[in-house]
Image (cartoon, rainbow, N blue to C red):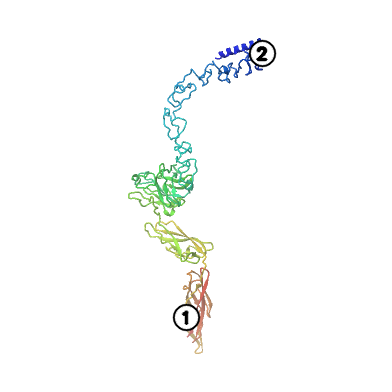
Amino acid sequence: MRVPHLIVGSLLGFAATMGAACGDKDTGGTGTTVDGGVSTDAGATGDAGSATFVDNDFDGVSPDDGDCDDSNPEIFPGQEEVCDGIDQNCNGVIDEGFADTDDDGTADCVDTEECDGVDNNGDGVIDEGFDIDGDGVPDCDVAEICDGIDNNGDGNVDEGFDADGDGYTSCGSDDVAADCNDADAAINPGASETAGDLVDNDCDGMVDEGDWAAGDLFITEIMNNPYQVPDPDGEWFEVYNDSGRDLIVNGLVLTSTVDSDWHQVTSDDLIWIAPGEHFVFGISDDITVNGNLLVGYQYADVSLSNEDDDLVLMMGDVVIDQVSWDDGATMPDPQGATMNLDPTAYGDILNDSSAAWCTASFPWDINTDYGSPNNENEFCWPVAEASYYTDTAEAYTCSAIYLVGSDSYDPDGAAITYEWELVSAPSGSARSSSDIAESTDVDPVFVPDEPGTYQFALTIYNGTEYSTPVYVTVEVLERPFNADPDSDAGPDQSYSEDVACTPVSYGVYYTCNACNDAEFSIDGTDSYDLDDDEITDYLWEITGGTGSGVIDDATAAATTVTMTGPSTTYGDSNTETLELTLTVTDCMGATGDDQMTISYQCSGT
């Protein structure tokens, strides 16, 4: 209501007009006036010597007259009070006359509701807006708990649960992971992982995950269909640490691409697998229900299907290993026994082949199913073991390589046979599997002819199943020494034959038939090499003599030579000879020769 303002303004205007009509002199400035005689100059005054009148908001009341806000024409003494948190009438009291339900000195119309059991804003509802958990009861007296929610309704979430002051609470929220070590500000979900410090620095559940690579662990055994105990209580699988270092499996994910099962290994303690160690993951670690199985870690939410399924091990984004099975189509499909990886096929690549798996046949405990948890697997087939040795420190060209298969065996004690094969040889070598001396022997001999890499394979057979081939690789060097071979053509030989002569003129002239051709056996097998080298070539030649003959096989170590029978005269004898030379060549290309003589005496009678 502005009535006081109009009265005061009119009176002031009237006084100013009367003063001007009486000829009063203006000594206080040069401002003009408006209707009512009010000066537009803040410095305008009345008669000389009177008080200065200031009214910046033109509400007719100056600060000297009690205007408490001379910038707002709606605020002045006598103004009607409005409930808006402002002192409109300049009496020093705000919103007087309006309700203040909680007696806090603030009228309900401008008061804010607090979670205090009082209707602060006077709307008839107590603590509205403070039912944080939706149970219909304001959460004013609820203690804050670490759950990502403002439990006590004070506008702060999980206050008091960031002990190390790194900005991450020990419980986290839907958007921010929990601080896994609230006593160390350097460990939190925003930190970077430090390799090799055995700490989960970034709170992702994985410890030193940057060091992991495919094949560090691989799956060796799977019990997906137990018999002695209920399924799934007896389900488990085994892994092998092939990394050469201790592995911490905290954070390892067990999952399946077939049915989307998922579980991450979690524990307050670090879970270690030593190099070369087998480790069992089981769905139950209670030996009273799982078949006396010692489980290294109990998982959940992963089912090993009896039909088509797979099992994948992951560390972060790295697939460590994966094995699939197909309800017996190619993989074993046993009940009461594990799918068993043959130890000769240990590896994350080798275990991809269904041919590397078989059904376990030995129980790990009395009255249990078949398998070998926490131990090396049983062999699926006869086990071939191959090695070699030489007479010298290195393997040299033309020196014997002794292949050894005598460590091979059949787990069930069955008799086995051996099959050796030359898989590869250096360029220029003329050697093949046929050059393995008795390739079906347990320990045969092979002589390389060129320097380089030779690879041999051994497969054994137990009458029912073949073993997985095993391989032996031999690096052969050019031999830096050699002695000439010693040729031995054998002893000289002689032969005699008589022929009857027919008189043409009795007592004066006779005709005699020639003696028959004679066959002689010649043998150079006593030739030898001082280095024990193989004699690779034999060559027989007729190099002299008075007779003639033909060698049956001039390149054989032992052969025959047919000598033409000599002619003769009555009462006389005729001896003819053949000189034979045997040249032998060793593996290094060195030669040696020897001669022998055959004598054939033909006599006429």
Considering every residue shown, the one lying at the far bottom of the view is: 507
Q: Amino acid at mark 2?
A: Lys
Q: Amino acid at mark 1?
A: Tyr
Look at mark 1 in the image and give the residue it sits on.
Answer: 495
The residue shown at (45%, 58%) is: 470
For the question of whether residue 439 can be seen, the reply is no
Mark 1 secondary-structure assignment: strand
Q: CA distance from mark 1 to mark 2?
A: 182 Å
Q: Earlier in the sequence, mark 1 or mark 2?
A: 2
Q: Nearer the viewer, residue 261 or 94?
A: 94
Q: Secondary structure at mark 2?
A: loop
Which mark lies nearer to you, 1 or 2? 2
Residue 542 versus residue 197 in the image, above or below: below
Q: Is residue 297 left or right of residue 575?
A: left
Contact between labelled residues 2 and 1, with CB atoms less than 8 Å apart? no
Residue wearing tag 2: 25
Q: Position of residue 438 (x, y in %)?
A: 44, 65
Q: Is residue 129 above or below residue 244?
A: above
Number of marks in the image? 2
The quarter of the picture where the N terminus appears is top right
How far across and how far down the image is residue 562, in percent? 49, 76
